[in-house]
Amino acid sequence: GAGVSQTPSNKVTEKGKYVELRCDPISGHTALYWYRQSLGQGPEFLIYFQGTGAADDSGLPNDRFFAVRPEGSVSTLKIQRTERGDSAVYLCASSLDSYNEQFFGPGTRLTVL
Amino acid sequence: RKEVEQDPGPFNVPEGATVAFNCTYSNSASQSFFWYRQDCRKEPKLLMSVYSSGNEDGRFTAQLNRASQYISLLIRDSKLSDSATYLCVVNPGSNYKLTFGKGTLLTVNP
């Protein structure tokens, strides 16, 4: 079956712009996660959704970052007023529920010029 | 102290070698432990879970020492296809929030 998909695969933007990153989880997975991976680092947790609600957004670095999952399936990570330090690979993962293995998508590589 | 610390690497080994990766974690309340593999410019994928009793999957053996807060991964008879970054991952108490180490790059040479 299809895995987690993310679009776009690459996004180049200018400092100060707004970006949206999309994640399509595996069908039937109720749990969805966003992570951020900077060069030479492991992924860092950003936010976890159980169904439509953000159960834990403690990893979001500041209020420029926001994520939604309005129908409990697709999720969008939104970044306002992008900064060069936001450049990273943004990974989405999903799992059947929070107790099960997380499957990662291929990521969106964000470059802020 | 970082939550999860790994050997800095990189490791360069010949085919057929045995290689061991080490990892320590700071949160003694951590519940579950994993090794993930990440190929260059790809997503991380679960390699194996790590249990207190130790577990083996073919050429791969994982060990956990809760008292020392130490995790290891041993790869025997390494193959070219084992070349990747190996990430030590800890679930610090919640079910969902995975904490990753920086990863250790392994290159297996012909």
Image (cartoon, rainbow, N blue to C red):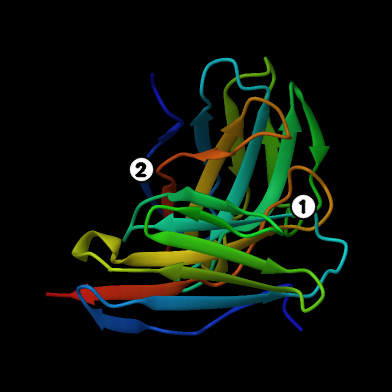
Which residue is located at x 61 percent, y 75 percent? B23
Task: Out of B61 and B86, give the one closest to the viewer.
Answer: B61
Q: Residue furthest left?
A: B110
Q: Residue at x 62, y 60 (%)?
A: B54
* Screen quadrant of the C terminus of chain B: bottom left
Q: Chain of mark 2?
A: A
Type of amino acid at the residue the image marks with label 1: Asp
x then y, percent, for residue B107: 27, 75
Q: Amino acid at mark 2?
A: Ser
| Residue A22 to residue A26: above or below | below
Please tell me which residue lies in front, A103 or A55: A103
Q: Quadrant of residue A48?
A: top right
Q: Is residue A107 above or below residue A16?
A: above
Q: Marks 2/1: CA distance?
A: 24 Å
Label 2 CA crowd tier, 10 Å (few <14, some 14–19, many 20+):
some
Marker disc for residue B81: none
Using the image, name the chain to which the residue with label 1 belongs. A
Residue A111 seen: no
Quadrant location, the N terminus of chain B: bottom right
Give the residue at mark 2.
A9
* Outermost residue to the front: B53
- Classify mark 2: helix, strand or loop: loop
**Numbered circle sitting on residue A63:** 1
Location of residue A82 with respect to B77 vertically, above or below: above
Per the image, label 1 sits on a secondary structure element best described as: loop
Figure quadrant of residue A54: top right
Q: Horizontal and vertical percent for residue A58?
A: 81, 52
- Viewed as shown, does residue A71 lie left or right of A54? left
